[in-house]
Amino acid sequence: MEGIRFDNVSKHYQEGDRKFTALNQVSISVKPVEFVAVIGPSGSGKSTFLSIAGALLRPSEGNVTIIGTRLSDLKPKELAKFRLEQIGFILQTSNLVPYLTVLDQLLVVKKMKGAITKKDRIFAKELLNEVGIGDKLDKYPDQLSGGERQRTAIARALMNDPNIILADEPTASLDTERAFEIVELMSNGIKKRNKAAIMVTHDERL
């Protein structure tokens, strides 16, 4: 199965009479079980790249293909459904819902697709055990450490069993030891579950 592929992708913005190029002729292919880090300083186009990879932004030129589907062929509603089912996001801040428990952070993702089943609950607990917080199911985000919140975010990104995992500066708020733990967890989950993954970072420690 294919992962994600960029073919000569560019993104331009118009500012008055000037055209600003945020992304210029990018081509990259990431296959299942591959975990790629895109490294660069602020302003180098990393966020634009990730937004296009996540089907949140359309490119000005070129094509993005995910598991054999060209994103430009999808209508807005189809694109939203595709994004929910095929792409898992891990962000710089965990973006957990403050009034949901750790377990419910994962189940709410399933709720977006329909009813929550007993199988979904079992799978959510399995994921939380894998990332080392199976004993925190009933805790709320403000009762978790920064590392535990990011572990919850990793499990949530895998909840819909998407083929693509995208991480945006997932270790920016963590110390070196926690940062390495989080990236190792991501790597293990990606390989075990046969995902294609891209992490955008300016952190060369990783």
Image (tube, rainbow, N blue to C red):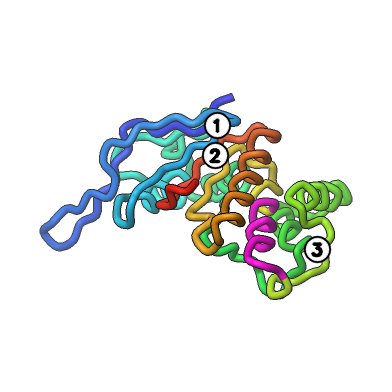
Which residue matches tag 2? 197
Q: Residue at x 69, y 58 (%)?
A: 152
What's under tag 2, amino acid-wise?
A: Ala
Q: Is residue 40 left or right of residue 189?
A: left
Closer to the camera in the image, 2 or 202: 202
Magenta-span inclusion, residue 186 = no
Q: Residue at x 59, y 24 (%)?
A: 1
**Circle 2 crowding by C-alpha within 10 Å: few under 14, some 14–19, many from 20:** many
Outermost residue, left direction? 17
What's under tag 3, amino acid-wise?
A: Lys
What is the CA distance from the residue labelled 1 to the residue labelled 2?
6 Å
Magenta-colored span: 144-155
Which residue matches tag 1? 34
Which residue matches tag 3? 136
What secondary structure is marked by label 2? Answer: strand
> Where in the figure is residue 144, as x and y percent of width and height?
71, 69
